[in-house]
Amino acid sequence: MRGDNRQIQTAVLGGAESEKPLMLPLEAIELDAFRRRHDQHTFWCGLLLGGCGLQLTTKLYTDRVCHFAHYPGPDGHPHLCGRSVRGVASADHLYVKAAADAWLRARGTQAGFDFVQPDGVPIGSVVDIQLPHRKLRVHLDQEVAPDWDAEHEPVLGVSVPVDSDTLIDRWYVHRIRLESEGTARRVRIGTEAFARPTEWFALDECEITDRGLSTPAVERIVQARSAPPSTRWTPGKKQEESAQDVQAHELMRRVLYARRTVSTDLAEEVCREIAELAGVSPQLRRRLDAARRSALAWVEKETEARRELFARLSQAVAAQKTGSVKAVLAEIKAGTTRGGRTEEEEHTVREAAAYLAAVEAARLARLDTLLEDVSRLPANEDPWLLKSKVEQLLQGATGAGKLGEHRQAQLSLWSTRLRHLPFPPRPATPFRPQERVPLHEQVSRAYWTTRPCPQCGVDRGQQCVVDGGPHAGRVRQVPHVDRLRPVVDELHEQQKKHGVVRTEWRAYDVPCPDCGQEAGAWCLTPGKPHSARSKRARELSAQQEPRL
């Protein structure tokens, strides 16, 4: 498993279990002031951030953003941390707790806070706030679906979807977002209602009432929903309407409601009632007919979109494209297809759900097998083999779904063991340059096609091709050995004849004493080779050792 190269933007102050979040400035000019302000503080990859609990340092750059970084391990290699979220929003749950606690204390109210992890979701997805007579649950992402019938009142992050039916039934829902201000995050509370834009307020503008969390927008929404409908009066005109005209106005309102709630069933029902309504004034009849034509065209468009959506789901299941199945199912569940589903649509959804369940079960079964294999390794096992097995295990856990507490604990244990495994250098193997360096690396590319190839038969100046199997005729990346061997032998003879000996060594011309990779093979570290390998190449160059 390679180290996670994503930049760490948040940490906690004082210790691994601290709840004091901190965000690092991105610009170098701001980082200098940040360092002076916190010269007596220590920064940590906090456990409540999902981190490893080790100390961090700050990295200053002028050509890219500044960030936190782990100190190197005892062997000098980069530290491997399993922290999954590292961006500026990775400590938002700690900022929510700090802001809510200060806000409630200012009002003489104390509350309990809990970073719950239902079904093993990552820490920070949900924050529970227990008030004296009420409970709020803050959903900062989509990992946990809101439960509108539970004892707690959901407060949704900006990425958490909510359907129109819920907005209509509940009158409104609350949202939360965090905005960066310097090295802190500021909490804003929003109120969203059906057919209304979300209104945002500072936390100090909000209150806790008998209805729960309340904003200035809530008061206006409640007042508007509770007030009796106003009657329209025009001076000098008689305000009497026939029963049919009153019904016509109601049908047009229902058409508008059906389109706003994306309910094709309701729209079709209203269109039938419009067609059957008689005795309407000519002016209203024209408006009714226009509304019916528009509604029928909209129903046809929505029905086609719905048909395409379920067809995409069926195709994704048939092609076993797990990511596409999840995306389309999420689109369906988010309310794209409101109203009752047909039996065929329900069957398609059930098939997709069964497919995802089978995929998750297969991944979990493979993960259990990997866990069992690793646990059976003897205590004195070769650290390099154990490292390979544990990396395979941790990679298998990626995308395996909800792992549960038991598997999470085992993975955390093996991840910790991996960080503390001793890796002694592998014994160096005798180095014979001419045997270790591939033939195509011993001569320049310009010499590769100076002779015809005796194996695949191509002429001089042409590249070698695959001479058998399913890929016959495809151009090879390197020439055949039989074509290169006489070229290399001829060049070696010329070098010996003229006394030309190559003494410049590259790092990959020698085996690596750290990870045991042979000459010509890349080191196990990402990016550059191990320093010991580069040092060995410089020593051979300094000793004028010949390189053929």
Image (cartoon, rainbow, N blue to C red):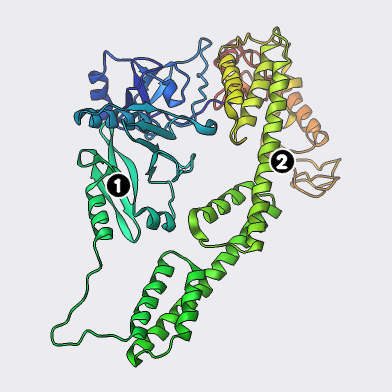
Q: Nearer the viewer, mark 2 or mark 1?
A: 1
Q: From this viewpoint, is residue 218 visible?
A: yes
Q: Looking at the picture, tell me which residue is in the foreground, 215 or 403.
A: 215
* Image quarter of the C terminus: top right
In the rendering, at what x and y percent does residue 410 appear?
61, 20
In the rendering, at what x and y percent does residue 461 appear?
74, 46
* Image quarter of the N terminus: top right
In the rendering, at what x and y percent does residue 95 appear?
32, 30
Question: Which residue in the structure is indicated by mark 2?
Answer: 477
Is 105 positioned to the left or the right of 276 in the image? left
What residue lies at 25% left-to-right and 41% top-to-bottom?
209
Q: Secondary structure at mark 2?
A: loop
Q: Relative to residue 406, is residue 323 depicted above or below?
A: below
Locate residue 401: give its quadrant. top right
Q: From this viewpoint, is residue 511 visible?
A: no
Q: Which mark is residue 458?
A: none
Question: Which residue in the structure is indicated by mark 1?
Answer: 190
In the rendering, at what x and y percent does residue 470 appear?
83, 48
Amino acid carrying label 1: it is Gly
Q: How many marks?
A: 2
What residue lies at 56% left-to-right and 20% top-to-bottom?
412
Locate residue 409: give its quadrant. top right
Q: CA distance from mark 2 to mark 1?
A: 59 Å
Q: Badge 1: few (under 14), some or many (20 or more) residues near its Cα, within 10 Å?
A: many
Q: Looking at the picture, tell me which residue is in the foreground, 315 or 121.
A: 121
